[in-house]
Image (cartoon, grey):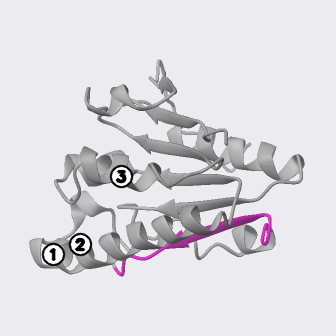
Amino acid sequence: MEKGKITVFSGEGRGKTAAALGMALDAAADGKTAVVIQFLKGRGLAESFFCKRMEPDIKIFRFEKSEVDYDDRSLEQKEDDVSSIRNSLGFARKVLATGECDLLILDEVLGVIDNNIITVEELRDLVSHRGDTDVIFTGRVLSGELCTFVDEISQISTVRFKKYETTENS
């Protein structure tokens, strides 16, 4: 049996999640299904009405209770969310074990490692059960240890970012 491909979108630039979601849209356009699990992102996309319209082809999940980004949470909020994050990784394991989707995106899972919530070895063990499901990891910091078992790495960097402003005369 062929193993699914593991892809990483990492770096300090903007667009890692967008690149991963683009892959989910490509999968859906090909008649495949994608599951996205978001970590550390505060409100995230799971509550979006637009995202609900993409189901059942693309399903987005977020298990953390806090509505603010992980870095902006209090120490108490971070401790509360650790068990939710671990539960979401258990859910990811179930998704892979059952072959529930063709593509699994673990959005900001590299941040989960960087914040010492899980280890690279735990993530390696998780994806060892992927069968032919493709898996995407996103996050800022890429561990050298992670590079030993992934198939493709894209480093995302932002050359220029300017927020669009609207004026009354626009």
In the rendered image, residue 155, in percent from the top left (x then y), is placed at 45, 23
**Vertical comparison of 51 with 16: above or below:** below
Q: CA distance from mark 2 to mark 3?
A: 19 Å
Q: Identify the residue under disc 3.
A: 125
Q: Identify the residue under disc 2.
A: 82
In the rendered image, residue 115, in percent from the top left (x then y), is placed at 19, 53
Q: Label 3: few (<14), some or many (≥20) within 10 Å? A: few
Mark 3, secondary structure of its residue: helix
In the rendered image, residue 20, in percent from the top left (x then y), is placed at 60, 43
Q: CA distance from mark 1 to mark 3?
A: 24 Å
For image coordinates 88% across by 48% down, the residue present is 29
Residue 104: image quadrant is bottom right
**Vertical comparison of 153 with 139: above or below:** above
Q: Label 2: few (<14), some or many (≥20) within 10 Å? A: some
Q: Nearer the viewer, mark 2 or mark 3?
A: 3
Residue stretch in magenta: 54-65
- Residue 147 among magenta residues: no
**Three-letter code for the amino acid on which mark 3 is drawn:** Asp
Q: Name the side, left or right, on which 125 lies relative to 73.
A: right
For image coordinates 27% across by 62% down, the residue present is 70
Quadrant in which the C terminus is drawn: top right
Q: Identify the residue under disc 1.
A: 79
